[in-house]
Image (cartoon, rainbow, N blue to C red):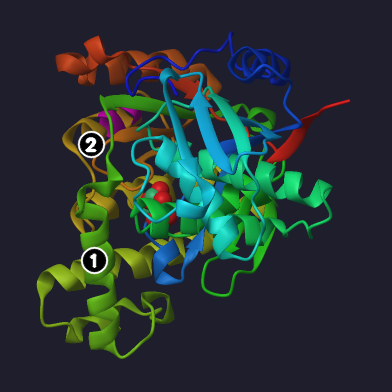
Amino acid sequence: MASPGGTPAAEGSPTPSGLARWFGECYGREPDLIWHAPGRVNLIGEHTDYNGGLVLPFALARGVLAAVAGRGDGLLEVRSRQAPREAASVRLDRLQPGSVTGWAGYAAGAAWALRTAGYEVPGTSIAVDSDLPIGAGLSSSAALCCAIVSVLAALAARAGARMPSRTEIAAMARSAEADYVGMPCGIMDQSASMLCEAGHALLLDCGSGKSSLVPIDPAAVGLQVVMASTGVPHVLADGQYAARREQCQQAAELLGVAVLREVTDVSALTVLPDPVLLRRARHVVTESSRVAQAARLLRAGRLADCGGLLSASHASLRDDFEVSWPAADRAVEAALSAGALGARMTGGGFGGCVLVLLPADRRAAAKEAICGALADGAAEAGVWFLTAEPAPAAREVWVSR
Ligand code: GLA
């Protein structure tokens, strides 16, 4: 995957045939199958997924390609075009959580999750390629896990196994990250990668698992959704994310509910004795209601009116949930002062990028304002701007003849 601060390449994006060629150079044969799984942008609904709440992400065109071919020696070998010297090889019957670390741990975790769910995973060679920047909050790890679970499941299905549903694949990909790698994420990113459709956002109720597609076409109304890097890579496995989950769970227990989503009225939170827990819970309750409002506005064709909800989401993440970071706060303010309709940090927090909703003719001004606001250090890290257009979910893109 690209370096955290690197400009995501517009041209030179990976292609199935390019990956098939590289696979041949690595393994001396052509792959059997290649799948693509996209990264995601979360329009709104941050830190609500593991609280049983609503999220509204859409899939990006950028993502991870994973190519596979079976092999007879019981080994899982994984290679990435972004780290060609770091091939990892592991015996499938010895796969244990944590036994493979670094980026290859996600791939090993995907195979482990499939096996744990009862799927046969024979010896396999895997090669991956990606145009998603890592640590940008665009779900490169979920896309990697979804691509590998999907392609391994499809390979097993060719040999007669049942192909799991997209929801089942999302759950296995989440398990790879949460139970194998040890990052206790929710289900939003994997669901976006597996369930989205072009031209739509996914309204997902993470409590019931029910989802529906909501049309979104920024260009049709003269708008853009832009992701702007802040030059600060995010690291979710550093304990802050897990600490927020823990605080939400504590608040839910004190309120006598299974998950915070069950609370709909902020006035019910005043019984929380600890002001920190109260703020955490208030974010979750208010954010869920913002997601519902945003979905209603989108269904009414009123994307522009979502701007205020995005900015309110940022304020809540900054002040109540305390997962924003100074560069994101500066970028959001700069974007708004340059005419954006709304802006907010996106993803788990503590680094990554900001999402900006703006009229297309404000893009250049917003970029200039954000670059100016981040001038110290972020400029060297390479601030990039990426227009996010709702793209399709994971799919098979190559089959051997
Ligand atoms: C990360 C996690 C998601 C979600 C977001 C915050 O992206 O992987 O499950 O919790 O943070 O909304």
Tell me, yes or no, whether the two marked residues, 2 and 1, touch with CB atoms within 8 Å.
no
| Of callouts 2 and 1, the N-terminal one | 1
Locate residue 108, reporting x and y percent: 48, 45
Q: Residue at x 27, y 40 (%)?
A: 235
Q: CA distance from mark 2 to mark 1?
A: 18 Å
**Residue 281 seen in the current view:** yes
Is label 2 in a helix, a strand or a loop? Answer: helix
Write down the region rendered in magenta.
Answer: 331-335
Within 10 Å of the Cα at label 2, are there few (<14), some (14-19), or many (20+) other Cα atoms?
many
Read off the residue under disc 2.
329
Name the residue nearer the viewer: 225 or 237. 237
Read off the residue under disc 1.
280
Q: Residue at x 62, y 14 (%)?
A: 22
Name the residue nearer the viewer: 353 or 368. 353
Locate residue 160, reporting x and y percent: 84, 55
Q: Residue at x 27, y 85 (%)?
A: 253
Q: Residue at x 71, y 21 (%)?
A: 16
Within 10 Å of the Cα at label 1, are there few (<14), some (14-19), or many (20+) other Cα atoms?
many
Most extreme residue toward the front is 73
Q: Main secondary structure of the magenta part?
A: helix
Is label 1 in a helix, a strand or a loop? Answer: helix
Judge depth for marks 2 and 1 and give the one in front. Answer: 1
